[in-house]
Image (tube, grey):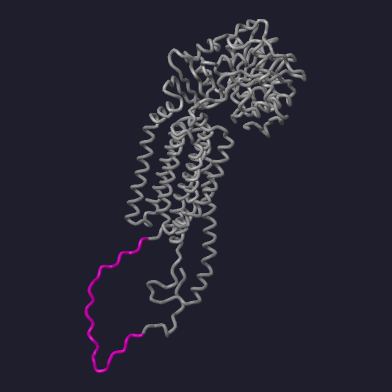
Amino acid sequence: MIEPTVTMPPSRVRQPPLRRRGRPPRPSRPTRSRRSPRPPRPPRSAEAVRFPVLAVVFVCAACGLVYELELVALASYLIGDSVTQASVVLSVMVFAMGVGSLLAKRLRCRAAVGFGMVEAGLALVGGCSALALYAAFAWLGESRYVVVAFSLAIGVLIGAEIPLLMSLIQRASGAGSGSAPPSGAGSGVGVGPGAAKRARRQAPAAEQDDAAGTVADLFAADYVGALVGGLAFPFLLLPWLGQLTGALVTGAVNVIAGGGLVLWVFRRDLTSRSRALLIAVNVSVLAVLATATVLVGDFEEAARRAVYGEQVRVAVHTDLQEVVVTGGREGPPDLFLDGRLRVSGQDEHRYHEALVHPAMNGPHERVLIVGGGDGLAAREVLRYPGVSSVTVVELDPGVVRLARTDPALATLNAQAFRDPRVRVVYADAFNWLRGAADRLQERYDVVISDLPDPGITPSTKLYSEEFHGLVARVLTRSGRFAVHAGSVTDRPHTYWTVDATLRAAGFATRPYSASGRTPGFAAGPDRADRTSGTERGPGDWGFLLAVPGGRPPALGLAPDAPRLRSLGVGTLEAAARRAERTRGAELPPSTLVHPRYGG
């Protein structure tokens, strides 16, 4: 407070009006006792406002990052190619945040109401984003545009948060900083021009320091909240609540934090009409989120039937993926992993016979299967009496558990996991092979790579030159390595990139294929052509048989091979010629730092 020590010039002092001569002054009337005016409310202290604002910034930042990760995870699961989906969501959302910051300028005059409405909208859009994305995938057949739309909407709303909070906290700091107007209220004496100028010169420096501190505090709370949200999503929300319920609960936390801040801390900045509007909007958003949370189970079941059909036998969420088994009671089952058809019970024998039996033409006492948690590749290997041990390296224990306990799958794999020769290792195949190369005393005669299509991003590193180099270290000198390499006819670039990568790792290869329906592609609408009425993926499987050295192996069957339903010597020769016809120009190998699949 600047003390009013300078008096006003005499010319500015109001003189009493002159009265006419001859008239006595009018007697003054006794003044009536008036009610004393209500004292003004004490200003809010800056610290009392700063702490709840920073706490809400922390919560809202955590919720915002959960929405972002939810979109990336669900888009990767529904559409595939997690690298592309993450790039699209992040870039669109960051751009939209800039747009939201610019649009927030129009709300600064009503920052409290604007922030409350922004948080309610963000909670509704972000909380329902997973439901809307899954619904578009299940019933409309296209979810890419929905991902972009929600990324834009969520980014705009997140971008408007910080500018509005800056306006609120600076307004509160200004009201509670103790600065007074230049006139001396209550003293009847004004402040001179010199003192007013000095006060104006001193004020900007303090305001700049306070604004800089406010910005630092807001961004610190924002970044720490993002850290907590990023860690809570994979370790708490996904395992405990799942993708759909986790997003809805996050939205409820978001609307409670944002609405509570405005309706309590900044209630003086609200009119009665705006307060009633905010209460109605926040209660409505909470009601919508609560209703959706109650009905999320029915929604997920209906969406699953729309994607997989009416005959869903088992649907479970493991720690890594969604596993669905479909099929009637009497017919063979189909196995889906994260929406992608992995096993078709009607023609899986074509795939597994072509993958396993050419590699068994030679010594096959010790066999390593990379992947193969369904037990079907192990079933074919165990048909050879000369096999003494089979090691299955599978990442997801839930798949093996289902293959053991589900009656249809256990019948299909001939109870392979109950055979005493089979040992299951639950580990990432890359890391396990990296340590097993020095730990194993004996090498494997056969290694079988029963993995998803190499175009699916999570499996890309298991088709890299480095991974194939690790396989070479655990093979015997006469060992054979069989690889599923995707479709030959529909994705020749991917197939021949796998061939180039094997040769770069020191293998000589022999390409061949088998006709049938290809695992690794979703049965859902994003990977089916509903408009033309054909829900069909690529029509063949492509394989590569590789051996160490420079001489390609001969395609054939072992003398003790069992009777096969779809494979013979003549069939293999025709399959090799069919694959060779698609060979094009030489392609570069795929490595960990430069993956080349997806073309």
Q: Quadrant of the C terminus?
A: top right
98 to 318, vertically: above or below: below
Res 572 quadrant in image: top right
Q: Nearer the viewer, residue 248 or 329?
A: 329
Instruction: Pinpoint residue 260: horizontal percent, then vertical percent.
Output: 39, 47
The image shows a total of numbered marks equal to 0
Q: Nearer the viewer, residue 241 or 135?
A: 135
Q: Nearer the viewer, residue 119 or 322?
A: 322
Q: Residue furthest bottom?
A: 22
457 to 343, vertically: above or below: below
- Magenta part of the protein: which range? 15-41
528 to 364, vertically: above or below: below
Q: Residue at x 43, y 40 (%)?
A: 251
Is residue 66 visible to us here?
no
Residue 32 inside the magenta-drawn segment: yes
* Left or right side of 533 for 478: right
- Name the chief secondary structure element in magenta: loop
149 to 355, vertically: above or below: below
Instruction: Pinpoint residue 465: horizontal percent, then vertical percent.
Output: 70, 27
Instruction: Pinpoint residue 6: horizontal percent, then vertical percent.
Output: 46, 78
Q: Residue at x 33, y 85 (%)?
A: 16
* Left or right side of 574 for 114: left
Q: Residue at x 68, y 30 (%)?
A: 590
Q: Residue furthest right?
A: 550
